Amino acid sequence: MNLSKHILAAAAAATLSIAAMSSPSFAEGFDQPHRPRMSAEDRAALLDARIAALKAGLKLTPDQEKNWAPLAACRT
């Protein structure tokens, strides 16, 4: 008996969430104007920053640091 109450509650929650997502107000959030495309220089700068963040997060040992340059050179 208790299991059927949980199933009924889950079905009701799923129905309500589907109904909420199909409402016009939910869809309005996706009708935003497109952002301008990034320039090639901006994309390169962003990629360089992400690679630098990755390298910092890895906390490479000196032995591993020796192998970083060839890996970083493969970014293009």
Image (spheres, grey):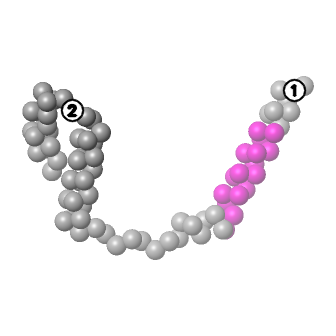
Does 14 sit above or below residue 45?
Answer: above
Dot 1 amino acid type: Asn
- State yes or no: residue 20 in magenta: yes
| Left or right: 4, with 23 as reference point | right
- Seen in the image, is 62 located left or right of residue 43? left
Amino acid type at mark 2? Leu
Quadrant, the N terminus: top right
Say above or below: 50 vs 28: above
Q: Is residue 37 above or below residue 50?
A: below
**Along the line of sight, which residue is nearer the eye, 46 or 64?**
64
Residue at 66% x, 68% y: name it: 25
Residue at image x 71%, y 51%? Answer: 17
**Residue matched to label 1:** 2
Disc 1 crowd, CA 10 A, few/some/many (<14, 14-19, 20+):
few
Instruction: Tell me, yes or no, whether the highlighted magenta stretch contains residue 11.
Output: yes
Q: Which residue is mark 2?
A: 60
Nearer-N-terminus badge (2/1): 1
- Residue extent of the magenta highlight: 9-24
Q: Secondary structure at mark 2?
A: loop
